[in-house]
Image (cartoon, grey):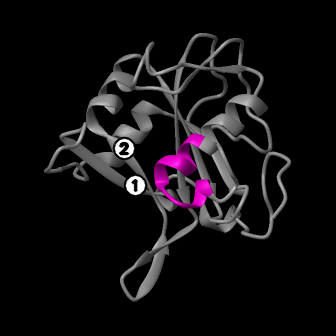
């Protein structure tokens, strides 16, 4: 990331910044570049176990060499005249590949501030996310790399009662 502000300018820049931070701070995963695979961002290098700052949903551990797709969303986003909980944006083709490979999602909820402080994280199997995405897929038009996408509010995966915007996870500060 070239500057702290650039991460606030676009979802892509925010996603890249979160991805880089997570891959550097979680020693059991390593970066997977787009030349290797465009459908996931990282993979486990050793056994990955849950921690207080990285809980697992639906599993107790992640074995080595499992693909991981990192998805981030803001804690809240504008919805016309009001705000709503942020949503993870999932591309159908990439999701299907992750699902076939028995992969995981590393889901991150962050605050839209410099440094992108994280307020919630979770490792979730693609199979569980698949169940949550039922009937949420829609086609996108135009010149996009994906044909079908779905959006999933973070509160459908992570319990909002356990998320405090004043407390960060992973050693970050608000």
For residue 20, what is the image quadrant?
A: top right
1 and 2 marks in contact (CB < 8 Å): yes
Relative placement, left or right, of 21 versus 150 is: right
SS assignment at label 1: strand
Segment colored magenta:
6-16
Q: Give neighbour class at mark 1: few <14, some 14-19, many 20+ (Cα, 10 Å).
A: some
Give 114 or 63, whichever is nearer the viewer. Answer: 114
Please name the residue shown 77% across and 44% down the image: 53
Residue 64 x, y percent position in the rendering: 63, 11
Please name the residue shown 25% across and 53% down the image: 136
Please name the residue shown 52% across and 27% down the image: 41
- Name the residue tied to disc 2: 90
- Name the residue tied to disc 1: 152
Relative placement, left or right, of 91 versus 168 is: left
Q: CA distance from mark 1 to mark 2?
A: 8 Å
For residue 52, what is the image quadrant?
A: top right
Q: Examine the rendered structure and indicate whether residue 135 appears above or below residue 50.
A: below
Give 149 or 37, whichever is nearer the viewer. Answer: 37
In the picture, the quarter occupied by the N terminus is: top right
Q: Examine the rendered structure and indicate whether residue 174 appears above or below residue 108.
A: below
Please name the residue shown 43% across and 38% down the image: 128
């Amino acid at each position: 990331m070239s500057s702290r502000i650039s991460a606030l300018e676009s979802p892509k820049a925010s996603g890249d910044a979160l991805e880089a931070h997570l891959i550097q701070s979680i020693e059991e995963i390593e970066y997977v570049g787009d030349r290797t695979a465009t459908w996931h961002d990282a993979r486990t290098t050793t056994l990955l176990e849950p921690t207080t700052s990285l809980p697992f949903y639906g599993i107790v551990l992640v074995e080595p060499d499992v693909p991981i797709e990192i998805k981030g969303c803001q804690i809240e986003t504008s919805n016309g005249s009001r705000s709503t909980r942020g949503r993870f944006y999932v591309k159908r083709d990439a999701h299907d590949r992750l699902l076939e490979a028995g992969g995981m999602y590393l889901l991150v909820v962050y605050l839209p501030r410099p440094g992108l402080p994280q307020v919630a994280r979770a490792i979730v199997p693609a199979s569980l996310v698949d169940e949550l995405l039922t009937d949420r897929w829609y086609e996108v038009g135009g010149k996009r790399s994906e044909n079908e996408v779905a959006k999933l509010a973070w509160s459908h995966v992570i319990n909002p009662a356990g998320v405090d915007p004043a407390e960060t996870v992973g050693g970050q500060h608000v």
